[in-house]
Image (cartoon, helix red, strand yellow):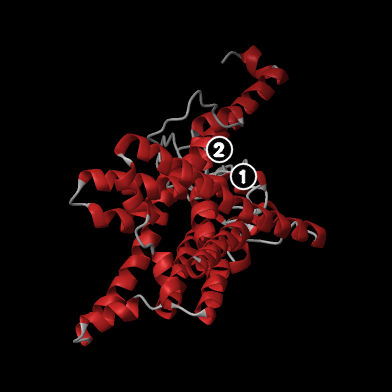
Amino acid sequence: MTDKEIQDPNNEQKFSNSNNRKELNDKFWAFCPVCGNKIPKIQKLKFCINCGTDLNYLKEYKQLKPTKSINPYILPKKYPQPYVPSVSYKSKKISDDDIINTKNLELWGTMPSIGVSLGAFLLMDFIIAGLVAIMIFFSFNLESLFDFIANPYFIIFSSFFELIFVLVPVLYVGKYLKNPSLKNRLGLLGFTLKGLTRKGLFKEILIGLGFAVAGVLLVYMVSFLTEITLEFFFGVEIIRDLSSTTSDVEIIISEGDILSLILLSLIMILIIGTSEEILFRGFMQKGLTRNLGNMGGILITAFVFAMIHVLGIVILFLDTPILLLISFVLSFIPYFIISLFLGLIYYWRNENLIAVILTHGVYDALTIIVVYIFYYAF
């Protein structure tokens, strides 16, 4: 440095500022200004060993070094990160207010709609078969046992097992509800008075009673037309023989009395109609229509309902293909028509089961009463 530069006061100030900046840059930080962790005393340490901050860049520019892209292989930093809510792909659970308005909500799929319903039916049959097997095991007189099983009071007792049709779907639908109380579970299945005034409830009752009478007339007309059609293709004699075969209802009537008739009619309304409609319309049809459309859900539900009811009938004619076909058609079509009828009512009543349950239960009771009248009158 020359004598002129030393004597110049401005040069002395510049020299002093340059030395201070160099001392500041060379000075070590005891703690990382970003993550707060202690920095080891290592000469020429460029990055924080905890969070990876570029210390040299931070000292020189007094800011963090910008990053162009996020490296997916870098472990998460220890200092606080912005909160990113997790994405959930589960179905939104149904609130109490939406229970009676689920037409636009995602519910159970096609496989649970059919599988759970068939599972409930098989469970009921398994329990009843187990009960009969126990009775056979402890009975030494099969004729007396068969008479006991055909007794109307045993049929009334075994009808209570159809409550399984309520239990199984009620247990299943709980996972779709925010508040899975029994009231909400039944409400989701359509068995609820929520949203109905007294006038509205009275209207549902009248609709149920009126359509029960209409259902009886409809099924008798369809059965008559089916017999005429089959007679045309297969001959009159064989159809008359099959159609005149004593049905289960006629066996109940012939073996029963007035008290058993009254009790059986009440069971049809309170147990059979309620349990079957909760399972087939409230659960199966409700789930199928969400996935297959309204008509597809109604038709498949009617088909499954009819098949379940005719299995015990057609098994009697397995050894004769022609008789099997004729008996299947004679039994299947009436069950399919009444189930289709009930499915349309359920859709029309905005998936409320009150009118549908009354239609089903009173229809079954009227069928027994009509058979009773014809049996003893003619």
Quadrant of res 359: bottom right
Q: Where is residue 161 in the image (x, y as percent from the top left)?
A: 43, 72
Q: Position of residue 344 (x, y in %)?
A: 59, 44
Q: Judge by depth and name the residue closer to the eye, 292 or 373.
A: 373
Q: Position of residue 323 (x, y in %)?
A: 26, 47
- Left or right: 232 as drawn, with respect to 38: left
Q: Judge by depth and name the residue closer to the eye, 52 or 131.
A: 131
- Identity of the residue drawn at 51% across and 65% down: 368
Q: Which residue does the numbered mark 1 point to in the structure image?
A: 347
Q: In which quarter of the image is the N terminus?
A: top right
- Identity of the residue drawn at 37% across and 67% down: 124
Q: Which residue does the numbered mark 2 point to in the structure image?
A: 294
Do labels 2 and 1 touch, CB within 8 Å? Answer: yes
- Left or right: 199 as drawn, with respect to 165: right
Q: Earlier in the sequence, mark 2 or mark 1?
A: 2
Q: Give SS at disc 2.
A: helix
- Left or right: 164 as drawn, with respect to 134: right
- Identity of the residue drawn at 59% across and 30% down: 21
Q: Residue 91: in sight, yes or no?
A: no
Q: Where is residue 377 in the image (x, y as percent from the top left)?
A: 52, 68
Alpha-carbon span between mark 2 and mark 1: 8 Å
- Identity of the residue drawn at 21% across and 52% down: 318
Q: What residue type is labelled 1?
A: Tyr
Q: Give SS at disc 1.
A: helix
141 relative to 357, above or below: below
Q: Judge by depth and name the residue closer to the eye, 196 or 41.
A: 196
